[in-house]
Image (cartoon, rainbow, N blue to C red):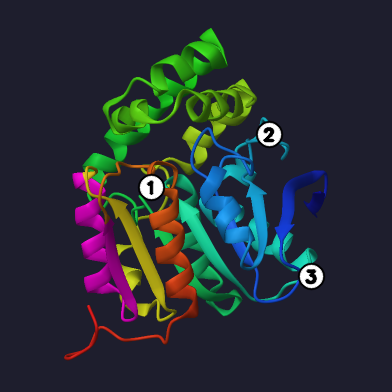
Amino acid sequence: MRIEVAAGFALNVERRGKNEGTPLVLLHGFTGSSGAWGEFGELLAQAMPILAVDIVGHGDSDAPTSLDHYRMCTAAADVVAAVERSGFTRANWLGYSMGGRLALHVAAAHPGGIERLVLIGASPGIESKRERLARVAADELLASQIERDGVRPFIDYWESIALFASQRALPAETRRVIRAGRLKNSRTGLANSLRGMGAGAQDALHDQLAGLTMPALVLAGEADAKYAAIAQEFASRMPCARAAIVPGAGHAAQLEQPERCAAEVLAFLASTPHTNSEGATP
């Protein structure tokens, strides 16, 4: 269902799962869509209502030529508006990679709308200004490459990077479905997502983590060393967060170990919150 959240701009939200209970908002990663959740999403939908959003520039959501709706602060306000216009003022939120960074921005700017927060393979951004500028420059090169060469050559490159090496062990049909979803995206949407929502373009949120008091679960694949370390950082900085490292998984833990990740998420959503104070459950 396409929902107009601003004049002339709409996001697509796919509602599935149960009709009762607190909904879980799903925010996919870069090049993904609301259909990218696979078995993991199906397992969650058996337990609760699901609102799977196509982030700006992806899936069936609009992909404007202007960067306005791609900037993290606006993108966060837009997805909150889409959820509210779907009939919910509060929800649980789950984001993967780019979608995790977006979910974290929602938590920072619109905390009243979040019951619980789940992050998978996500970060609070890049703390060093020099490194942020370098990332912006690198993402601009990729954006220009997409505009020049098209989506398919870029997806060929994207699927070859080390971050996704562990996905090559996925079943062939799973990899085919993931690739088909990536190829449905547009040049403009992907290029502008890099420019507006890249880790260098967004504000770094490290200093805001201590003020995010909603219960949070931060998942990362065991083979994804960088994000496993970041998950532990989240758990140490956020008052009510804990990290869970998923064995046998890389960056997209929810695709590589869907049953394990779904079990972690469902247990977390049903659990009693804890705080990261002395004596708390780690």
Q: Mark 3 points at which residue?
A: 87
Residue density around tag 2, few if under 14, some if 14–19, many if 20 or more, within 10 Å: many
Residue 191 or residue 61, whichever sits in front: 61
Magenta-colored stretch includes residue 15? no
Residue density around tag 1, few if under 14, some if 14–19, many if 20 or more, within 10 Å: some
Q: Indicate which disc, 1 or 2, sits on the residue closer to the N terminus.
A: 2
The label shown at residue 257 is: 1
Instruction: Please state the horizontal and vertical placement of residue 68, each as a whole percent of the image.
Output: 62, 44
In which quadrant of the rendered view does residue 33 lie? Answer: top right
Find out whether the residues at labels 1 and 2 contact each other: C-beta distance under 8 Å. Answer: no
Report the mark closest to the observer, 3 or 1: 1
Q: Is residue 244 left or right of residue 2?
A: left
Point 40% across, 65% down: residue: 264
Q: Can residue 232 be seen in this view?
A: yes
Q: In this view, does 192 lie to the left or right of 224?
A: right
The vertical placement of 45 against 241, above or below, is above
- The CA distance from mark 1 to mark 2 is 31 Å
Q: What residue type is labelled 2?
A: Ala
Instruction: Please state the horizontal and vertical placement of residue 71, each as a whole percent of the image.
Output: 54, 47
In which quadrant will I find the C terminus?
A: bottom left
Find out whether the residues at labels 2 and 3 contact each other: C-beta distance under 8 Å. Answer: no
Instruction: Please state the horizontal and vertical placement of residue 28, each as a whole percent of the image.
Output: 53, 46
Chief SS of the magenta region: helix
Q: Mark 2 points at which residue?
A: 63
Q: What stretch is highlighted in magenta?
A: 225-245
Point 41% across, 23% down: residue: 158
